Image (cartoon, rainbow, N blue to C red):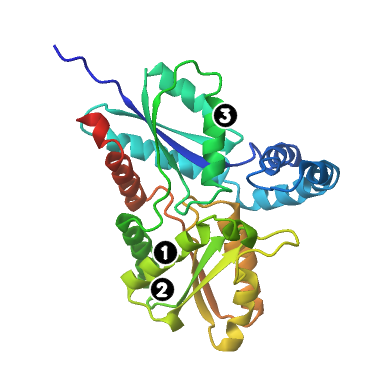
Amino acid sequence: MNQKKSLIGVLLINLGTPEAPTPKAVRKYLKEFLSDPRVVDVNPLIWKPILNGVILNIRPRKVAKVYQEVWMDEGSPLLVLGQRLTKKLDEKLNADGQRFVTTMAMTYGEPSVEAAAKVFRQHHVERIVVLPMYPQFSRSTTAAAYDRLMSSLKRCPHWPALNLLQDYADHPQYIDALAASIEKQWAVQGSKRHLMFSYHGIPKRYVTEGDPYQSRCEATTQAVVAKLGLNESEYTHAYQSRFGREEWLKPYADETIRAMPKKGIKSLNMISPAFAIDCIETLEEIDMQLRDEFMDAGGEAFDYIAALNDSKDHVSLYETLVLENTQHWMN
């Protein structure tokens, strides 16, 4: 008699979020996040005094106010929308019978990787496919998530079998989902507008040292542009969210968007394919800050195209990614 195969674990990993939109909670989150050398790879002897003596005494109050502007009734958008996606994915994967256990963890903060591991142990899971919720690989995001995962396994005497996904920047179903979300927005508007792709930036040095992030972002943009049939005058590719004095990937989104109205681009749609789930960088930085900068510079119409979040297309994409990477476990 054949032994029944154990359930397969599906672990979705995202960056993280404060537990509350308060200075205290934000400080705790920023301390963990900005202490990771994957995020800030400055000599600790230089960085730690700056982080603990300056940044963590100034930024938490400012950042908390930003979180308060986008906080949902149930909590942080990144966490709430991510949990909704996780639940829908689990339901879809198990529509024909229980085969998977799906849960979500954060690289920084809660729910932790250890909490996810506890869920898997309760279901006797011995095979786990890990899907970082970053469409484009970077050492500062995807690699940091895997560092966190491996760190959590240091004390584990018996490791599960792991399948680690790298990214899905040009996966056909991902491109189709992005294109469909853009076309849906154009239909609501009654016409298409100039389309700006804005990706979270990283220091240019990272790319020079071998990080493939820039090329993966460009691959996403070019695939969507081809799918929509756009010419070079109909779209712009840029990077947002830089900080510090070091040069980051260019063109910078804020500088680019301020110059657009003078070039005759006064109606704009913005999309940020680097984010699987809407968060502070999309809901506040794009849909508030960059919107205001565009309109103040002479823009007339601005609409942000939401992340895929817990949409039907996003659930289907993640289902496909999971099934493509677990077929060898189900035969």
- In the image, residue 140 lies at what x, y percent? 58, 48
In the image, what residue type sits under mark 1? Ala
Nearest to the eye among marks 2 and 3: give it.
3
- In the image, residue 245 lies at what x, y percent? 75, 62
* View extreme (left): residue: 1
Corner quadrant of residue 240: bottom right
> Which circle marks residue 83 in the picture?
none
Label 3: element kind: helix
Drawn side of residue 27 relative to residue 210, left or right: right
Judging by the rendered image, the residue that carries numbered circle 2 is: 189
Q: Is residue 84 above or below residue 66?
A: above
In this view, the residue in front, 262 or 114, is 114
Judging by the rendered image, the residue that carries numbered circle 3 is: 151
Tell me which numbered mark, 2 or 1, is placed earlier along the sequence.
2
Quadrant position of the C terminus in the picture: top left
Label 2: element kind: helix
In the image, what residue type sits under mark 3? Ser
Q: Residue at x 69, y 48 (%)?
A: 40
Between the residue at mark 2 and the residue at mark 3, the CA separation in whole angstroms equals 47 Å
Judging by the rendered image, the residue that carries numbered circle 1 is: 219
